[in-house]
Amino acid sequence: MTKTADLQQLARDHLWMHFTRMGGYRGADVPMIVRGDGCYLEDANGKRYLDALAGLFSVNIGYGFGEEIGQAALEQMRELPFYTNWTYAHPRAVELAAEVASLAPGDLNRVFFVSGGSEAVESAWKLARQYYLVRGDKRLREHVGSSPERRHDAIFANLRTPTRRYKAITRHTAYHGTTLGALSLTGIPAIRVPFEPLLPEVRNVRNTNRYRRPDGETEEEFTADLLAELERTIEAMGPETVCLVHMEPVQNSGGSFVAPVGYWRGVRELCDRYDILLSADEVITGFGRIGAWFASERYDIRPDLITSAKGLSSSYAAIGAVILSDEVAAPFLEEGSMYTHGITFGGHPVQCAVALKNIEIMKREGIVEHVRAEEGAFRAKLETLLELEIVGDVRGAGFFYALELVKDSETKETFSSEECEELLRGYLSHAFFDAGLICRADDRGDPVVQISPPLVATEREMDEIVGILGTVLAEAQRRMLG
Ligand SMILES: Cc1ncc(COP(=O)(O)O)c(C=O)c1O
């Protein structure tokens, strides 16, 4: 075992942490987490933290099942440590695909495994791009049948898609991952700009930020306005060139934006009208976070595709999946047809064994039901923080909330970027951590504090979260608002 002091030096010399201002650690210790149990983590100095972010919105069963999941991984290692899903199947991938299909809503029955969320998103977009081609081929074959002379007619009848569909629509401020394809779908300028030019052609429409809408606007007006913009965007891009609308059921970046009434029905209708695939990015919301196995089920989104990762294994393994409907899968299942895509570790047997065990634990412990039963209590506790002037809004669902921070809760005046820097990175991030709470203070949109604990959190942990938030935010208020 390497000693703590040596680990610090080795980390400073060799480890490159993700999305981290590394210069800040030149003379300082990096935060070093060494173990976890339940909703808690412990650092190298023995200090404990309540992890109100569940790792990265992902350790749904908490940190306490390492023994049991490790045993499943060990057994799989003994039986078959690796084999691929390229051309071959193996029992754990088959079992997991069947399990995921049984949990997914509607006819989302086919599962393509990958190694994480960004890969799932990339794969969904590639799948949508290829879908129209293989569907065109299928229709052509059906029309031509055994009569080659009908081929000419068919081409004239436009049965083969005449234009390639490759464009996608996502929402402002939404995070869909960091690999180039997924980044191209991401609507956060600060993380896109250094890597431009990105993939053509993605347009962002407005997200469902209710808090920043005009006072007095009804839910129906809000929905109608959002849908009208989506339709205008499809028309402007050329509907025959758009293959994908990709959206989170509850948008994380910007702070847990829940859609208004009628929104998902309207998005589905527009996708149907213009023959565009609808993809629900459930990398965070899947596997219980919103109090259902999939948020698509809770909100009746009826997507053609779901992208999923994090909660699929509660992050005990690096596994993600694209789940697709029978209708989307159909042309790919024709003789001679193929989704021209694959990843070495997609459907890795050990990752699948871990994900299967995770789902077994979630069912046995009633975790999805627990979230649904406790979400009201959790929200009510968080809403007590609205008494603070600096807390303008509490929003979200299930165990997935955000507090929006404002200068004035009456006028909703927000902080300038310099003030955000001082508030979020200058004070809050450190203050939460020092107080033993891991959560995220973020300003990809307006400044928010994001709360997304393991789904095993009980009222005791909720009280502790709200207690620390209250103390730290009261001090932030004193500093920023006087
Ligand atoms: C909605 C959403 N999609 C995709 C991703 C990318 O997932 P990963 O970090 O596993 O690549 C994330 C990650 O946070 C996410 O929140």
Image (cartoon, helix red, strand yellow):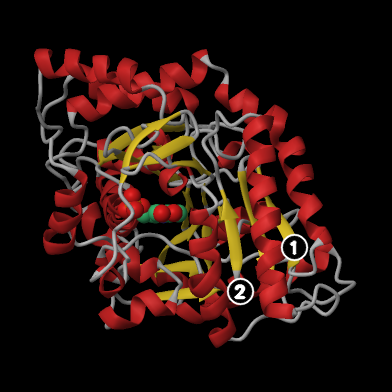
Q: Which residue is mark 2?
A: 446
In front of the other: 398 or 99: 398
- In this picture, residue 16 sits left or right of residue 46: left
Say few, some or many: other residues with alpha carbon within 10 Å of mark 1 (under 14 / 14 to 19 / 20 or more): some
Number of marks present in the image shown:
2
SS at circle 1: strand
The disc labelled 1 sits on which kind of residue?
Asp
Q: Residue 214 placed where, x, y %?
A: 81, 77
Residue 181 location, quadrant: bottom left
Give the amino acid at mark 2.
Asp
**Residue nearer the viewer, 60 or 220:** 60
Asked if residue 368 lies left or right of residue 242, the reply is right
Please tell me whether residue 280 is drawn above or below residue 217 in the rendered image: above
Q: Is residue 124 visible?
A: no
Q: Residue at x 64, y 25 (%)?
A: 370
Cα distance between the residues tagged 1 and 2: 11 Å
Q: Earlier in the sequence, mark 1 or mark 2?
A: 1
Tell me, yes or no, if residue 134 can be seen here: yes
